[in-house]
Image (tube, helix red, strand yellow):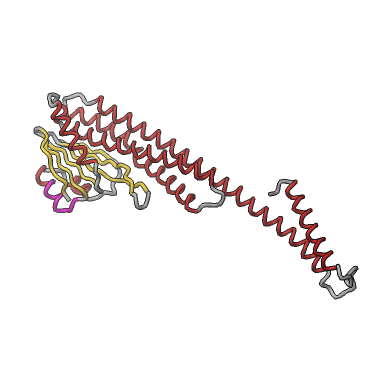
Amino acid sequence: MTKGSLKIGDVTRTHLVNPSFKEVKILIEKYHLHEIIEQDFLDFTTQDKMDVYDDCIFVIMRFPKYNEKTEKHFANTMHAILGKDFIITVTSNHTNNIQKIQDMYRKELEEDSSEAFKLSPYYILYKIIDAMYDKALIGLAKFSQDLIKIEDVTLEIDAIDENLLSLLLIKKRNAIMMKQIVTPHSEILSELQDATMNFYEGDLDVYFEDLQYKTDKILWIISMIKENTESLFDVSDTLTQIKTNKVISILTIFTVILGILTRLSGMYGMNVKLPFDSNPWAFTGLFLLMFAVAGITMRYFKKKKRF
């Protein structure tokens, strides 16, 4: 599905979402692209990579995307082809950032279009990746806030909460997934910076350095979130064990008390001669004795801080 083309100076900017074979074929023929690019265009399972051809650069990068229904992150694959006067981007899933990037870029050019490098496909790609990183940073900030809320709930609950454990597992899985997605970016950006120098005479080093900085920042935040999630999971597991042990202790105490009372009542249920069995106060006395034994037993366990 084509999302639209935009003319930026002499550069044509085209974006597609999960394109059909026909749409890819049209682009391949229009820009005379290599057949290997055609194959990769239709395969969104390919890992991050960068290929340099005689007249273009082909880049595959994955970015984290959040599914609100499942509360899970997954990889939104982006393919980008940079020629001298065109840039084509293709994503496996829809992203609201594309239109936002175009609007911001158009506004930036209206304010200042005197710098030639802003009219290059390489700078446009920088703006796209930069916007993707900004969105990822916003998502990570919300991720951290969610962990703080989960921590408060974890320390307040008095019983085992299966929903909380499930949520922690999802958060742990999301942190691992995001790290796997972003980790290859450092190498890709370094290769892209070197390749750009051979295709473009302008100096874009400062922009690629900015992307490298954001990549490192994102990976650092993800590492912190991963550690916090694992720590929170360990705390939850420890609290669950403590609460489980407490419940088992209380049940054990009641089992001991009931065992003693059952033995006393069972003795007077036997068909043998027992002391006071003919006394009219025997039942009352036995009941009071059982009550006293239960009280003494509970007082003993309470003194030992068993409950």
Q: Nearer the viewer, residue 87 or 196?
A: 87
Nearer the observer, 83 or 89: 89
Could you say where residue 123 lies in the image, as x and y percent from the top left?
19, 31
Q: Is residue 215 magenta?
A: no
Total count of labels = 0
In the displayed structure image, the side of residue 303 where residue 50 appears, left or right = left
Query: Which residue lies at the image location 85% right of the left edge and 68% below the top edge?
Result: 282
In the picture, measured across the screen, residue 293 lies left or right of residue 12, that is right
The residue at the point 15 percent across, 31 percent down is 120
Closer-to-camera residue (140/286): 286
The span shown in magenta is: 19-27
Expressed as whole percent of the image width and height from the top left, the position of residue 19 reads: 19, 50
Q: Is residue 214 above or below residue 73?
A: above
Answer whether residue 25 is magenta in the image. Answer: yes
Q: Residue furthest bottom?
A: 271
Say above or below: 12 vs 266.
Answer: above
Q: List x then y, in percent, for residue 175.
A: 41, 42
Query: In the picture provided, is 241 more to the left or to the right than 80?
Result: right
> Looking at the picture, does residue 240 appear above or below residue 140?
below
Residue 147 figure quarter: top left
Residue visible at 47% across and 52% down in the picture: 163
Predominant SS of the magenta segment: helix
Residue 9 image offset from top left, x and y in percent: 9, 32
